[in-house]
Amino acid sequence: MINLNKASFLIYLFLCLLYSNLILASVEEIVVLGDWKEISPDKKDASIVLLGSKEIDNQAVNHFEELSYLVPNLNFAASDSRARYFQIRGIGERSGYQGTPNSSVGFLIDDIDYSGQGGIATTFDIDQVEIHRGPQGSRIGANALAGLIYIKTKGPTKKFESIGRVVLGSYGRRSIGLAAGGPLQIRDYLTYRLALYKHEEDGFRKNIYLNKSNTSRKDELMSRLKVNWEVGNETSVKLLLSRVNLNDPADIWTLNGSLNTLSDRPGMDSQKTNSFGLNIFSQFDGFNFQSLTSSTNTDVTFSYDADWGNSESWYPYVYDYFSETVRNRETKAQEFRLLSNENLQVANQRTEWVLGISYFEIKESNFKKDDGNYGDPSDPFGPYFSQSSSSSFYQSENVSLFGSVDYSFTDTLKLSLGLRREDWKANYNDIIGERFRPSNMMNGGKISLIKNTENSNLFASIARGYKQGGFNLGLGLGLGSSNANIIYDPEYLLNYEVGLNTSSLDSRIRLSAVLFYSDREDQQVLISTQVDPSDPNTFSFLTKNAAEGVNYGLELNVDYKINDSLNIYTRIGLLETEIKNWKSRPDLEGREQAHAPKNSYSAGLNWDLNRNFFLKMDTAGKSSFYYSDSHDNKSRSYLLTNLSLGYQSDQLEVSIWVRNAFNQYYSVRGFYFGNEPPNFEDTLYERHGDPRHFGLSLQYDL
């Protein structure tokens, strides 16, 4: 019998071979929306993966986390219910923070910054997803050292339209979505779009102690209203109101690597986010003015059964710990931009420019409460009870000046220069008396040379990204309390890229390839340790600056539309990483960085079998990677296959689908520590990815 993993790989290999033997046709046009100006991806001087609405709908997914498998050199670390933290080219956070909310991967939805809050990224009524790989020092700044994830939801239309979607699946999945929009009056200058989405599922774990199958369930509600107002011919106003409510228990971790949990006090991973956005666009003679205003208010409850067991599983020992954190985060953002709206003649050459200023504020409060007890039957003085609580307040302000100039030497040769200067100040205090007021002045930018021809785009670029510094908390618990350990400096990344975007003469094939090399200066590395082996709530985290690191590789995207019935794509990412010259941790020098698989890839096909029936298939895989810089354990490589077979007419689409069709075991997170009495030996604990699940989707368009 063929091994299932080998069978999946053979499917992937078959698709790759098929690409080189088929006659090609035209490819649907799409533009990049996450830059200052809309631009064709064929003209960009960067490595980008675009996922359009049709490709997203074909996946039968509910969250961006599930789409991320399709993007090479994009990874995520999921410790809880939904993935909040992502890594691009091996750079990015892997878990919650202690101290500074500090993101390496920017996460924007409708131009609102949700960096570090990726859990709210549901995928209903999405227009486009863009993954910009590489530093975005001039475009975003401190939140985008490694790259940017940009999601654009569907906007109002001048003609009324509506859609309804119902999804039923295994593990108790049931989802319903409604979206409608059009003109608010007979005149079309005032339009709207309203989207509502409800998703529920029991989750993929069974708590055999409580005899429940829903202690890792999903209970999620999204509502979003967009209103556009065309004020004359030169000005438009766009209003956004949204609310995402994730009420998700977090009974995830198991002691034996199975999908059966033993917790007696399952935790919670809930998030409620209210968002407001107001964008104003005005055209003047020679330039455009843009104002982007936004605010968010987020309440998070994160709790977990820290011992992962119960009184029976730990008998005769008494071992029972629980931790809960309640967080509120408020953000405010204001950005003003001036953009040229035509090619201006400067010294007989064409010039395009952008000039702007932005302000971003975070206010965050945290309240943490831990309790537990431990007793050994051989100890006559036990059991020992512990209870602690703490509260903290954090505030930061980022003020940035930015701009870019594109200078065209000829119709086919252009020089692009972007710069950003950012001033970051923060204020932190907590109930135990720790107080910090760090500040950094940081500079980033990008310079690129772009050669355009009729069917290809060749570019070379140098970009500098940055990530603000910060501070460590609770160092008196055992990690050391020297000043060198308390404060860490900003990290900088100097990225070199050479890329090619090309298509066949009749636009029947599109290919993009990017070679990149990144130097990481003062690389921030997170190390964790468990201070008291018998108390899992005593984990402490220390972020320090390693002296140097390098990340380099290749990213390749190929898109084919063979004919009107068959479309195929493949995406490949090759990545090499290394930690270098870290004097305080020589054991890590020369090692690969964490959550940075050397190989990642995806391939898929969309095939209209006849006038109404279709088949969709995709595969995605990753090679093994280190879970953490704190230990030497690695994941196993994996390859996942998803299938969908359906019927479609002008208004109706019905499909049956299966994800992880070969039921591959794979892991998305790993911890190595002691959590089992009485010896508390260090053990590798891994979190499963989603097992095979299947369902039925129905969508009706009006």
Image (cartoon, rainbow, N blue to C red):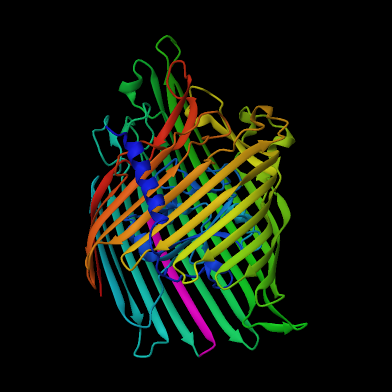
Q: Position of residue 342 (x, y in %)?
A: 63, 83
Point 38% across, 90% down: residue: 187
Horizontal relation, residue 60 to residue 532: left or right? left
Residue in front for this viewpoint, 652 or 347: 347
**Quadrant location of the C terminus?**
bottom left
Image location of residue 116, percent across then percent down:
52, 51
Quadrant in which residue 127 is drawn: bottom left
Task: Check the image and report above or below for 290 versus 151.
Answer: below
Identify which residue is drawn at 68% across, 45% down: 520
Which secondary structure class fits the magenta region best?
A: strand
Q: Place residue 134 in its image quadrant.
A: bottom right
Location of the N terminus (image quadrant): top left
Question: Residue at horizontal 25%, vertical 48%?
Answer: 694
Q: Quadrant of residue 508?
A: bottom left
> Is residue 479 found left or right of 617 in the rendered image?
right
Tell me, yes or no, if residue 108 can be seen here.
no
The percent position of residue 44, horizontal first and vertical second, equals 58, 66
Magenta residues (range) = 233-245
